[in-house]
Amino acid sequence: MSALLSPELQRMLDRLRWSSRQWARSAAHGEQRSRARGTSVEFADYRAYVPGDDFRHIDWNLYARLDRLFLRLFEEERELPVHVWLDASASMRFGEPQKFRVACQLAGAVGYVALGSGACLTVHVFPAAWERVHDGGPESAPPAESESEPARPGGKVSEAEAARQWACELGLRRLRGRGVAVRLWEGLEGLRPGGRVDLAAWFRMRAAQVRAPGVAVVISDFLDAQAPTAGLAALVARGLEVHAVQVLAPQEWAPETFGELRLLDAETGAWREVTFGRYRWKAYRRTVERYIEQLRAFCRGHGVGFVSVRSDADLSALLGRELRSLGLWS
C-alpha cells in the first residue's frame, strides 16, 4: 500500500478501535451518520473525488491544474470530525531516523483507525505548500474556507513540485471510510518538509476555521522560539478534544558531537558558534527535559493529552503504549 505502512503495522491497526472522549459523547457515530444540505450554498472545502460522488460538484478548474479530481463541498456533515495537524516545517527533516517520516507514520496510524471507525478525517499540513513556497506565515496562504480557486504556487520550488505538494495536501481533506486508506497513506508519503512556521499564529488562524467539536491530534517537534502552547490553547478554545504528540530525534535528546561547533537553524538559516563539552551536554539534557516537562504541565492543566516520543522508538510500541495512553483507541 505504502512504504510508510508495513503489513505488520496494518494488521496491528486493523485490531484497534477509536475510543476518544468526543467519540463516546457523540450523539451519532460516523457509521450511523446522517447528512443534511447546508443552510447556505457557501463553499466549505475540497476533498478528493471517489467513485459514486456527484459529478456536479467536481472542480474542473482544479482538475485542469492538478490532473486530479476534487469535489467542492457544500454539505454539513454530522459525523465526528477528526483533525490531524502534521508539522512539515524544516526542523522535521532532522534526525536519524528522520522525525518527519515517523510523524507521517503516526499521522497515518491515527487517520487509519479513525477512518475505520466511521469518522471524518482531515490532515492539516503546516506550513502548507503555499506557505513553504512563499516562506511566509499563515497570512500568505489562501484561506482554507475560501471559494476562490487555490492560486498557483511558484517561487522557491518548481511549479510541478509545488502543484504536486498542493495536490497531496488537498487529497488529505475530509476523508471518509476505510476505502480511502490508500489515498491517505499515499498522500502522506508524497509530503516533504520545509519552510518555517509560527505555531501560535498558525493555529490561532486555523482554529478559527474549525466548525464543529471534534478531535485534534497535533504531531510536531514543538521546537518554536515563540510559545507553542498558545496554538494548543487556541484549539482547546474551539471545543476540540486535543492531543499533542511531540516527536524528537535521538540526536536532540542526547547529542553525540562535541567540540567547537557551528550550528545551523533549519528554519531561519541563522548560524551559531558554540563550544559543546561534557558540562554543556549535561546542561543541554536538563534543558530538554525541563522543556518537555513544561509542555506536559501545560497540557495537563488545559486538558490536553501529551506524549513525547523519539523517532528511533519501535513504532508498534509507540502505537500500543504511548498513543494508547492518550485514550484515542482501545
Image (spheres, rainbow, N blue to C red):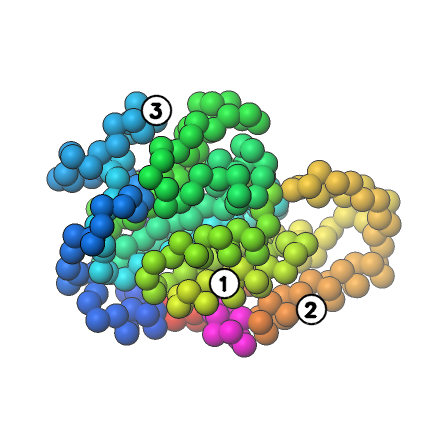
The residue pinned by badge 2 equals 290
- Whether residue 150 sits left or right of residue 228 in the image: it is left
The residue tagged 1 is 234
Specify the quadrant of the image occupied by residue 114.
Answer: bottom left
Disc 3 marks a residue whose amino acid type is Arg
Type of amino acid at the residue the image marks with label 1: Ala
Local SS, label 1: helix
- Residue 195 appears left or right of 181: right
Q: Is residue 209 magenta?
A: no
Name the one closer to the observer, 95 or 21.
21
Residue pointed to by mark 3: 65
Of callouts 2 and 3, which one flags the residue occurring earlier in the amino acid sequence?
Answer: 3
The part of the image, by quadrant, that contains residue 125 is: top left
Answer with left or right where residue 128 lies relative to residue 39: right
Vertical comparison of 327 with 44: above or below: below
- The reply to whether residue 182 is in sight is no
| Residue 320 x/y as whole percent | 41, 65
Cα separation, mark 3 vs mark 1, equals 34 Å
Question: How far separated are the C-alphas under marks 2 and 3?
Answer: 48 Å
Mark 1 surroundings: few (<14), some (14-19) or many (≥20) residues within 10 A: many
The span shown in magenta is 299-306
